[in-house]
Amino acid sequence: MIVLGIESSCDETGVALYSSEKGLLSHALHSQIALHAEYGGVVPELASRDHIRYLIPLIEQTLQQAGLNKTELDGIAYTAGPGLIGALMSGASVGRSLAWALAIPAVEVHHMEGHLLAPMLEEVPPAFPFVALLVSGGHTLLAYVEGVGQYTLLGQSLDDAAGEAFDKTAKLLGLGYPGGPALAAAARKGRADAHHFPRPMINQPGLDFSFSGLKTHALNTMMKLAKKANNPGAVSLGQQDTADIARAFEEAAVDTLMIKSLRALKQQHCKRLVIAGGVSANQYLREKMQQQLDELGGELFYPAVEFCTDNGAMIALVGCLRLQAGQTQPLEIDARARWSMQELSAINSVLSDF
Ligand code: KG4
Ligand code: ZN
């Protein structure tokens, strides 16, 4: 079965072709970073229009790369939520209509399920069950995963998502948009122990997170430094001070994610951890987690960097699994801004494939 996957929930247009026999055949991505950069964040209306502009050319490009004709497609998968409703509608309309025109089935994919199962694109995929730490720009959660669609929520962020905290702190530091990779790059030049940021909620029981305080802590540290330099009105810092704060923030955020993930593994009597979503591209997070899992005698899985952030490959993969299990979407287009992962149905028939 060959499935076309379409991702358009936020600011990347992702398209991919996935084969149930051969795996990923081709993929293409158009990032809207340049479009939104001057506004310091995603402008939803601009995002929708840009998706419309790029979807068809990207579909043609992926077909060409794979040496396929659209008549050879067996199904089409598109992200139906959660995300920006206009952006979702762009991809969903194109995907659902194309499937209708080709008389093939279409299937809706949950964006976060896409992230969660993205490590299945790798040569060595994780076996079920595992604990998953999903860290993206819009969501931060820990889940116990027993199979495709079998997700038990263990904890989540009560306020900002981890990626959002990276982005907001980067913005405060004048590092631009999107902030995660920029902050991580600045942190590399930061000095150890220049500042110590709190690790939010680690002393409370449970597996929930809270990241909004870290951004406030960064702001307070900036103001203290400005005052010390006798320049209380200053909004920008020197390069070293910026790097020091970036490092202290990254260490605190990563430590917090690590402590809660290890707690979740212990609670579930599990030694297999998957990290996925945009923040799982973070090198420091990967290294720290690997170190901890090695000490524990456990296994760590994460997607290739290009499949950590939004992409069409993860949508094509999940779509293929769900289409193979017989799930299809009727002609109506039902994109939704909010959609709980717990509402997803389990598919047992394909579990043996992994
Ligand atoms: O999964 P994703 O592409 O989009 C959502 O579904 O939200 O995640 C994007 C988030 C952004 O907040 C971005 O700053 C963050 O992932 N991110 C990173 C890194 N690369 C992307 N955060 C920290 N370090 C990185 N290297
Ligand atoms: Zn995402």
Image: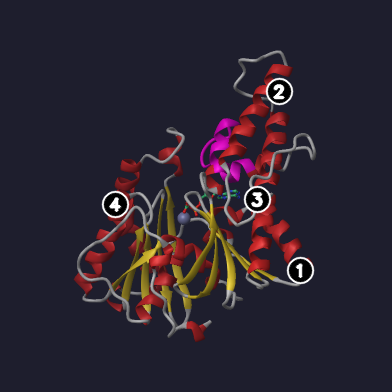
> Is the C-beta separation of discs 1 and 4 under 8 Å?
no
The location of residue 65, given as percent across then percent down, is 42, 68
> Is the C-beta separation of discs 2 and 3 under 8 Å?
no
Q: Amino acid at mark 3?
A: Gln
Q: Looking at the image, is mark 4 or mark 3 earlier in the sequence?
A: 4
Nearest to the eye among marks 4 and 2: give it.
Answer: 2
| Residue name at image x 72 percent, y 63 percent | 290
Q: Which residues are magenta?
A: 165-183
For mark 2, what is the residue?
Answer: 225
Nearest to the eye among marks 1 and 2: give it.
Answer: 1
Q: Looking at the image, is mark 4 or mark 2 earlier in the sequence?
A: 4
Dot 1 crowding, Cα within 10 Å, few <14, some 14–19, many 20+: few
In the picture shown, does residue 66 fall above or below 306? Answer: below
For mark 3, what is the residue?
Answer: 204
Q: Looking at the image, is mark 1 or mark 3 earlier in the sequence?
A: 3
Query: Is residue 253 in the magenta section?
Result: no
Nearest to the eye among marks 1 and 3: give it.
Answer: 3
Callout 2: SS:
helix
Nearest to the eye among marks 4 and 3: give it.
Answer: 3
C-alpha gap between disc 4 and disc 2: 46 Å
Instruction: Tell me if residue 124 can be seen.
Output: yes
Asked where in the image residue 132 lies, by quadrant, the reply is: bottom right
| Residue name at image x 42 percent, y 46 percent | 32
Instruction: Tell me if residue 73 can be seen.
Output: no
Asked if ligand 1 lies within 8 A of label 3, the reply is: no
In the picture shown, does residue 338 fall above or below 45? Answer: below
Q: Amino acid at mark 2?
A: Leu
For mark 1, what is the residue?
Answer: 296
**In the image, is 150 to the left or to the right of 334?**
right
For mark 4, what is the residue?
Answer: 52
| Residue name at image x 42 percent, y 66 percent | 342
